[in-house]
Amino acid sequence: MDVAYLIRILARRKWLIFAAMLAAAVATFVFIGHKPERYKATVIVSTGIVNYKGINSDNSDAFVQQYQVENAFSNLMEFAQSRSTIKLLTIHMLRRDLLAESSDSIQPFRQPNPGLSDYSDQERKVLLENLVRINLDSISDPAFSKEFDYLLDKVARAYGYDHDAILRSLIVRRRSETDYLTIDMITESPRLSQHMANEFATRFMVYYHNLSVREKRKKVLFFEDLAEQKKTVMDSITELRYTYLRSRSLPSIGKQSEDLISQISDFEKAMELAESRRDAAVASMRQIDNYINNRGTNDAYANRDRIVEKYNTEENLERVKQLTQKSLETNGKDPEVEAELAEAKKQLEQHIRSSAPNLGKQRNKDESQRTRESLYKDRVTADLNRIDAEKTVEQLRTKIGNLKGRLSGIVVDDEYSTNLLNEETRAQEEFNTINDQLVTARLDLSKSDSPLSVVENAQLPEWPEPNRQVLLSLFSAVVVGTLTTILLFLLAYMDGSLQSPDLFKRYTDNLPLLGAVSTVPTQGLDLNRVFSTNGEMPKYNLFRESMRKIRTQVLQNEDDHIFLIVSSKSKEGKTFAMHALAHSLAANNKHVLMLDTNFKTPLPESYTDRATGNSALLNRIMRENNLVKVFQLKTPLGTSKRQRVDIIGNHGLHKSPSEVLDGERFRNFLKDLREHYDYIFLESAALNDYSDAQELVPFVDKVVAVFNARSVIKAADKESIQYLHQMGDKFAGAILTEVDSRNMN
């Protein structure tokens, strides 16, 4: 697309651009003038971002820290303008106005507008009941149902408290390069702006703090639930163990097992001592028997007496031994045996005492005799000690066996109880661990402070915000002018029509151009007057001169007299171009005949068969060439009889020229006409649709193609243009019709 051509288009449309700019400026000026006044209230909030992420004094991490600061501010501002945060303000403002409508002490800020959203009294009542129950300061996450959200948005839209309306009134930005965040609220009322700004800042900071500690709060709740579960498990195991011990009548299996083992150990030690005493007594008896058996023959009498005493003693001793054996067999539980044993021991002791004086006297007489008696007495004592030790060993062995039997019965209970005790210990350890983590999480939550704080609350605005009426009007004019210019550029760029000769050459691969014809009004157009006037019709000057230039090129070659007028498609202006060229030649004293060979589209009804000065001649030639059934005379209405341009039309046959016309006869027909006319113009059907033009080309001297400046070259047109290029010298050139006069040059 030629830049100069685009600039010419803008120059021609300059008044359109100026009109659009003026209309935009006026409309903006009027619109802003009718807008209600707006009041702005501002809250300044300290964020703590710069304090926590300040740039180091040595600037070692300036870029990273600065990026973090800017990113933190961006995140905070997006959070402040999020739908969840604004919904909290919507709930507060809607609840206040709904409650104020039924109160005498509080005035609502706004009244509902049914045109924005219509709702029923029942819906209003249900919504108010839900709003009253909501605690906006609660640290719990607010959970709203879909029905509540729908009803909230429906009623809030009527009051102008919905998300979109608040977002249009809210401006959140960072205050220069400081740590502060400014929250601007712009509404139609000073009090409403102040109230909404302060309330939004409060709701925003509370909600931000709740979200910042949400994970910590969830952690505390998680450990509380987990600790409760662990405690329940631990208590259940303890209760199960105690129930088992009570069912087995075992106060403490572990303690009882330890007591039994301790008793068995004590009894085993006592049995070892008794066995030692028994072995010592047996050894003593064996030694005493050796001493007694080694005495000489000199003691025979004494021995005899001693033997008697010994016999008696042994008899008593044997009796004691037998009774002792019975006592051991009955475990000392038979009273009769125990009584007899005690009586036998008593008799034995009396017998020993009764024989003691005799033995004493005997010792006085004989030292040797006293020695034997002493040994015998020691042997008896040792034997008694042996018997007592054996009885003690048997008793201890019985007790140890009983205790071991009881201990073996407790092993199974002790194993089950031990497992329960181990599980209880493990559950106790898990509970202690979770409880420690719970305490840590609670301490961490209690130390969480919100970094946001209000530095300056919103004050009641005294003056409305400037509406910048003039500035916005100028800006809108500039914007509309720019958009209009761009639109015109786009329309011109996207327009593929043949608007000018330059574009025609570009789109047709430099197809030879005879000339361009400007657009002229065809209503009441008389071509005879146009080309015969002496400058009386100035509005046709450009058109007339364009046709004269084309006529000059046609007259350059005196050998070319028969021309075929073609076009790539219908309604390109072939007929008009042929008529204009014919009358232009007639104005130059040339006799011109127009022969309509477009059998698909014959001349319209405005052409009659009224007789002219050459009617007889033409009828004769048609009869001589047997073409009366094909052609007939045509005369435009209002044409004078002294015209220099004659017209032969056709009857409208839906056949091609080769099917209608005999080649030799038609050639003779043209030859006869040529004797009376300087130029003959033939018109054919469209090249894209029919073969008429190709069939008529052999009968003519030159071919002239007609293109319309409003046409767009398509694939079929390109094929026709290629065909025209291939004609070579037989192609005289093209005529571009209906060209805007401003695009002629």
Image: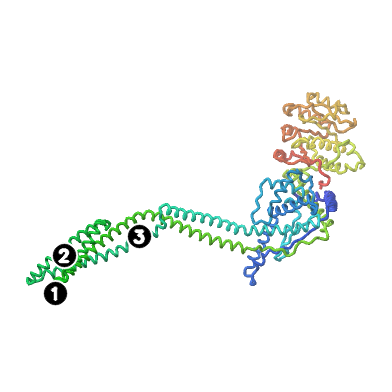
Packing grade of label 2 (10 A; few <14, some 14-19, many >=20) is many
Q: Residue at x 46, y 59 (%)?
A: 425
Number of numbered discs overlaid on the protein picture: 3
Amino acid at circle 1:
Arg
- Mark 1 or mark 3, whichever is nearer to me: 1
Residue 595: percent from left, percent from top? 80, 31
Among the two numbered marks 1 and 2 on one chain, the one whose residue lies closer to the N terminus:
2
As measured in the structure, the alpha-carbon distance from the residue carrying label 2 to the one carrying label 3 is 43 Å
- Whichever of callouts 1 and 3 sits on the residue coming sooner in the sequence is 3
Mark 3 lies on a secondary structure that is: helix
Mark 1 touches mark 2? (CB < 8 Å): no
Q: In terms of sequence position, does the residue under pointer 2 or pointer 3 come before the other? A: 3
Q: Residues within 10 Å of mark 3 (few under 14, many from 20)?
A: some
Is 351 left or right of 131, judged from the image as shown? left
- In the figure, residue 622 lies in which quadrant? top right
Q: Amino acid at mark 2?
A: Thr
Pick the residue in front: 18 or 568: 18
Label 2 element class: helix
Is residue 597 in view from this perspective?
Answer: no
Residue 88 locus on image (x, y percent): 70, 54
Mark 1 surroundings: few (<14), some (14-19) or many (≥20) residues within 10 A: some
> What SS does tag 1 mark?
helix
Query: Residue 616 location, x and y as percent?
Result: 86, 25
Q: Quick one: 192 or 368, which is closer to the camera?
A: 368
- Left or right of 531? Residue 437 is left
Which residue is identified by label 2?
313
Q: Residue 260 got which mark?
A: 3
Q: Which residue is mark 1?
A: 363
